[in-house]
Amino acid sequence: MDEQAAVRFLTNLLGIYSPSGKEQDIANFLALEMKRMGFEVGIDMIGNVIGVVGEGEPVILLCGHMDTVAGHMPLRIEEGKIYARGAVDAKGPLASMVMAALEASKEPNFKGKILVASVVEEEATSKGVRHLITQGIKADYAIFGEPSGVENITIGYKGQIQLKIVVKTETGHSSTPWLYDNALEKAYQLWETIKAACTYPSIEPQETPFTAITACLVRMIGGRGNSVIPFEAEMNLDVRVPIQFTTTQVYDKMMKIIANYQKVHPNVNVKASVLDTVEPFEANKSLPLVHVMSSAVRKVLNQPATLLRKTGTGDMNILGNSMNLPIVTYGPGDSHLDHTLDEHIKISDYLNAIQIYKETIIKISELHNSKAGIK
């Protein structure tokens, strides 16, 4: 592998600012570069870039996202690290997959087709991966490119409910606050009630961050003027759903909490609506894909892989719950650096990840073809 070319490719990706909804420039760059590398490339109607190399079976989907959260960071390289928005989340993993697909396709013992999907709006709406599903994308195996740490493989993510709650009360002059309920105060009181019911750690002995229901208040607005008691307040909650529940079950729990609150406060009107949901997902750790990637980590790094179950939510949830195929998430980078001003990736981790992806692609194709596609 030409390591300088691989680093240059990642650096060029990081040099293009691509917050969610503004991925056109990076999509055009990716399409041109991948065509130059030898991929068959197309850009679909919503802006996803799909590159294909190889032919036949198995079909291996490598899916990453080219958007980032908003907030430009100056790109710099210092002491073997590349600092930039998206270095970890998730242009580092995406670049690794592109380079690995190219390298694997050149190997004489590789048989199969590799689809590299660079999707849009993962950080916002997951519009890109949802579109792939509606268009009927087919694969035998899938790997999502997200920062797991070069020595780790992510097999599980919690689900998510984005919940909007509107609280309304009667109003009056702010000089007589004892006469009226304050919608902002009542909304926060309701939040405190929900928070108390979703506190981690609780007294449950088997509870872990992955198995706990958690809720986070991410936004609250209300009030119309300095002399008016707030009569409407709106808050948004990010509720994370563990693998033992569905989003419907957890939503029902939230509604019971709200209903009990309204019984105690009959003059307060509360309406809840769901903005989006993603079901939790966990891959079976006995899957050959998991074993093959674990072996690749051991071979390249000379250390065992660690399987992770994360408290976040990823596009793997959406595809894994929609298609019956072996799937994991993997990628270089420390996920604790996601969205931070210190976001950076070690060049050595990036290059090692390319080799791990490559080894996984080749070995899973050999296993598929030698054992009639056992999954």
Image (spheres, grey):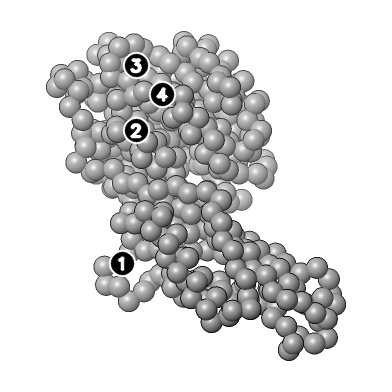
Question: Which residue shows up at 59% across the image and 58% down it?
Answer: 164
Question: SS at mark 3?
Answer: strand
Indicate the position of residue 307 as horizontal and vertical percent values.
29, 47
Relative depth, front residue between 103 and 309: 309
- Position above or below: 343 against 264: above
121 lies left or right of 185: left
Choose between 110 and 255: the one closer to the eye.
Answer: 255
- Label 4 crowd bin: few (<14), some (14–19), many (20+), radius 10 Å: few
- Residue 105, percent from left and from top: 35, 15
Dot 1 falls on a residue whose secondary structure is loop
Q: Residue at x 38, y 58 (%)?
A: 249
**Residue on which the image places disc 3:** 113
**Front-most of residues 238 and 250:** 250
For the point 60% across and 68% down, which residue is it?
Answer: 270
Q: Which mark is residue 323?
A: 2
Q: Identify the residue under disc 4.
A: 137
User: Disc 2 versus disc 1: distance between alpha carbons?
Assistant: 29 Å
Amino acid type shown at disc 1: Glu
In what element is the residue under mark 2?
loop
Q: Residues within 10 Å of mark 3 (few under 14, many from 20)?
A: many
